[in-house]
Image: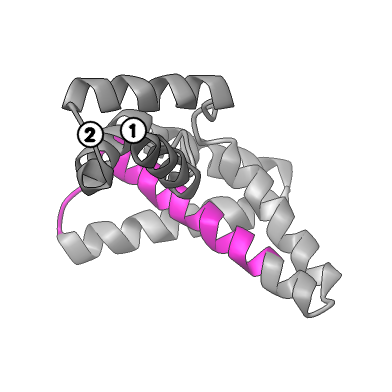
Amino acid sequence: MSLKGQITEDMKSAMKAGDKDRLKVVRLILAAIKQIEVDTRAELDEPAVLNVLTKMVKQRRDSVEQFEAGNREDLAKIERDEIVVLEQYLPKPLSEDELSKLVDEVIQATGAVGIRDMGKVMGQIKAKTAGRADMGAVGAAVKERLTAQ
């Protein structure tokens, strides 16, 4: 079953179980996917759906930071609860070791020798990780490796 199909089935399950909090988040996911499909006039494939989910998680993490800075722990908790539901649909994140190994492999495969090759390396890593790594952390690791050479 596709990821989008799984999300739809989970919406039905949440409705039957009366799980209002989960239902709210699942409906938000489906609405975000549908909005992009309407805008682009094309059905989203798995990587595009993963991209939507990744953006939603990132938005909520940013919101948590803002709410905590504003001493609004009640709102931060709601956002953290939504992150938990969203992350259930994302693939298992790469470990530090796996990420480090991947960065080294891509640098070697592309023949990158300096910081000016960072875009080439990042493009390949982004394609290989598909929602399994924080691209900010990946960028920092790539930059560190390329400046060390």
In the rendered structure, which amino acid carries the disc numbered 2? Val
Magenta residues (range): 41-64
Callout 1 touching callout 2 (CB < 8 Å): yes
Whether residue 94 sits left or right of residue 18 in the image: it is left
8 to 34, vertically: above or below:
above
Whether residue 65 sits left or right of residue 132 in the image: it is right
* Residue 17, x across and y down, in percent: 72, 41
- Can residue 44 be seen at all in this image of the molecule? no
Q: Residue at x 84, y 69 (%)?
A: 74
Disc number placed over residue 113 in the picture, else none? 2
Disc number placed over residue 149 in the picture, else none? 1
Q: Quadrant of residue 87?
A: top right
* Residue 103, x across and y down, in percent: 38, 28
134 to 24, vertically: above or below:
above
In the picture as drawn, the residue positioned furthest to the front comes out as 149
Whether residue 69 sits left or right of residue 37 in the image: it is right
Query: Is residue 55 highlighted in magenta?
Result: yes
Nearest the eye: 91 or 110: 110
Whether residue 35 sits left or right of residue 7 in the image: it is left
Q: Quadrant of the N terminus?
A: top left
Task: Choose the circle earlier in sequence order: 1 or 2.
Answer: 2
103 to 140, vertically: above or below:
above
In the rendered structure, which amino acid carries the disc numbered 1? Gln
* Residue 36, x across and y down, in percent: 28, 60
